[in-house]
Image: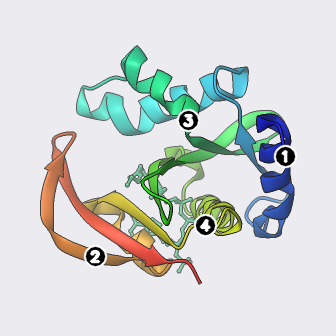
Amino acid sequence: MSHVAHKLYISISSGRANQKSLPGMALKIIDHGTAEYHQMVKLRNEMLRKPLGLHFDDDELDREKNDLLIGAFEDGKILGCCLLTKVDDKTMRLRQMAVPNNLQGKGIGRALMVFAENLARDLGYKMLIMHARKTAVGFYQKLGYAIEGDEFVEVTIPHFEMVKKLN
Ligand SMILES: CC(C)(COP(=O)(O)OP(=O)(O)OC[C@H]1O[C@@H](n2cnc3c(N)ncnc32)[C@H](O)[C@@H]1OP(=O)(O)O)[C@@H](O)C(=O)NCCC(=O)NCCS
């Protein structure tokens, strides 16, 4: 199966995650380097890096060619995003979860998480892990993630490792 066909299969088979949230919202896998990807990077920059005085470098973005890039869209406009990076044959790391300030609290983050979990499960992964910002721990706990280990600092702010077994 080609890379593109493989992604299409994943997108369709995980369509069951496309739940309520905003009625016109579509969840999908984004191809690296496309206009959708640039929207995603802009959103991540605004939400996750600029407030900390940080930015993405080209090498970091280039490495994402190997990741599963996920976006929520309405009328071609991005509403939220996250991505999955392979850790080993059983485990994926969820990263870069972001919903714009004015769209938070509408279920977009939850829909992205369910979509990402179904993708990982469809591909045979057994576990999702992440470095969760302390301020977002409650969000992940609602979705069944548990803290593992002690608080640590990453990108200048407190984080916890969180994990969830995919059933
Ligand atoms: C964290 C984030 C992705 C959540 O997205 P969202 O679309 O606002 O979340 P949802 O509306 O789907 O919320 C799902 C549930 O989690 C709760 N929730 C959302 N954010 C929360 C938080 N920071 N702490 C505790 N609970 C939270 C909601 O109240 C909702 O609860 P309910 O089902 O009982 O009503 C979003 O707030 C965000 O982008 N924050 C800034 C960037 C960030 O911190 N990203 C995470 C990096 S690890």
Q: Position of residue 70 (x, y in %)?
A: 64, 46
Q: What's the CA distance linking mark 2 and mark 4?
A: 17 Å
* Badge 3 element: helix
Q: Nearer the viewer, mark 4 or mark 3?
A: 3
Q: Which residue is mark 2?
A: 147
Q: Earlier in the sequence, mark 1 or mark 3?
A: 1
Q: What's the CA distance linking mark 1 and mark 2?
A: 33 Å
Image-based side of 48 in relation to 109, left or right: left
Image-based side of 5 in relation to 117, left or right: right
Q: Which residue is mark 4?
A: 117
Q: Earlier in the sequence, mark 2 or mark 4?
A: 4
Q: Which residue is mark 1?
A: 8
Q: What's under tag 2, amino acid-wise?
A: Ile
Q: What's under tag 4, amino acid-wise?
A: Glu
Residue 25 visible from this viewpoint: no
Q: Position of residue 34 (x, y in %)?
A: 71, 21
Image-based side of 4 in relation to 121, left or right: right
